[in-house]
């Protein structure tokens, strides 16, 4: 199917790649269908693109690329809601706040996007009782600064 996007103009997508956020995203409860599209060849940065609103796309990244010790436990209710059977089926993304210059970009580690890659169910989870914040500088403790492109 064809999809109009914020960062890729019009592209062809495969319906099997569509993620379903049953309750939408916080602040966007009506937005339930998204797709993850690579923004860079290195596939470090991605666009979490809405299927219904072309101009709604979040820049996301795998937080473990930047934060090797990032760790949290999903509540049982989330595991059940997403029907997660194995850690191997889970992909985690952090929403980035892109700054100028790019080296000041931050990641929201308090509210990761959890995707069950097996059934394509997804949810942005608010972590409670963790020390993570909504704005962690992604280049502070990493050698990935060369991947700023």
Image (cartoon, rainbow, N blue to C red):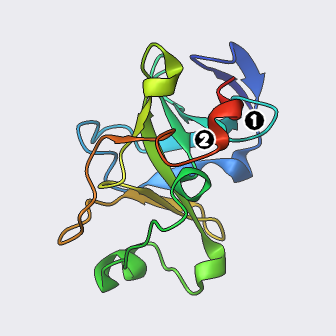
Report whether 62 appears left or right of 39: left
The picture places residue 16, in percent across and down from the top left corner, at 72, 53
Q: Quadrant of residue 48?
A: top right
Q: Residue at x 74, y 41 (%)?
A: 43
Q: In the structure shown, which secondary structural element does the residue marked by tag 1 occupy?
A: loop
Where 36 sits versus 85, above or below?
above
The residue that disc 2 covers is: 35
Q: Quadrant of the N terminus?
A: top right
Q: CA distance from mark 1 to mark 2?
A: 9 Å
Label 1–label 2 contact, CB within 8 A: yes
- Relative vertical location of residue 28 with respect to residue 25 in this rendering, above or below: above
Mark number displayed over residue 109: none
Q: Could one spot residue 144 in this view of the protein?
A: yes
Q: Position of residue 11 (x, y in %)?
A: 75, 22
Quarter in which the C terminus is drawn: top right
Dot 1 or dot 2: first in sequence order is: 1
Q: Can you give x and y, in whole percent of width and height, for residue 138 in the image?
A: 48, 41
Residue at screen point 41% across, 80% down: 79
Q: Nearer the viewer, residue 36 or 22?
A: 36
- In front of the other: 49 or 43: 43
Residue at image point 40% right, 58% down: 123
Q: Is residue 84 left or right of residue 129?
A: right
Residue 13 disc label: 1
Is 131 in front, or is 111? 131
Residue 54 appears in view? no
The local secondary structure at tag 2 comes to strand
Label 2 neighbourhood size at 10 Å, few (<14), some (14-19), many (20+)?
Answer: many
Numbered circles on residues, count: 2
| Residue at 68% over, 41% down | 44
């Amino acid at each position: 199917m064809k999809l109009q996007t914020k960062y890729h103009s019009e592209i062809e997508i495969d319906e099997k790649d569509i993620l379903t956020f049953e309750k939408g995203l916080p602040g966007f409860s009506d937005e339930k269908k998204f797709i993850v599209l690579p923004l860079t060849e290195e596939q470090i940065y991605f666009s979490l693109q809405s299927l219904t609103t072309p101009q709604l796309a979040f820049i996301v990244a795998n937080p473990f690329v930047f934060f090797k010790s990032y760790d949290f436990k999903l509540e049982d209710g989330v595991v059940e809601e997403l029907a997660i059977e194995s850690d191997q089926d889970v992909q985690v993304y952090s929403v980035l706040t892109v700054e100028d210059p790019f080296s000041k970009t931050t990641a929201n580690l308090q509210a990761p996007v959890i995707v069950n890659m097996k059934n394509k169910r997804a949810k942005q989870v608010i972590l409670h009782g963790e020390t993570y914040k909504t704005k962690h500088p992604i280049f502070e403790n990493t050698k990935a600064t060369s991947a700023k492109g």
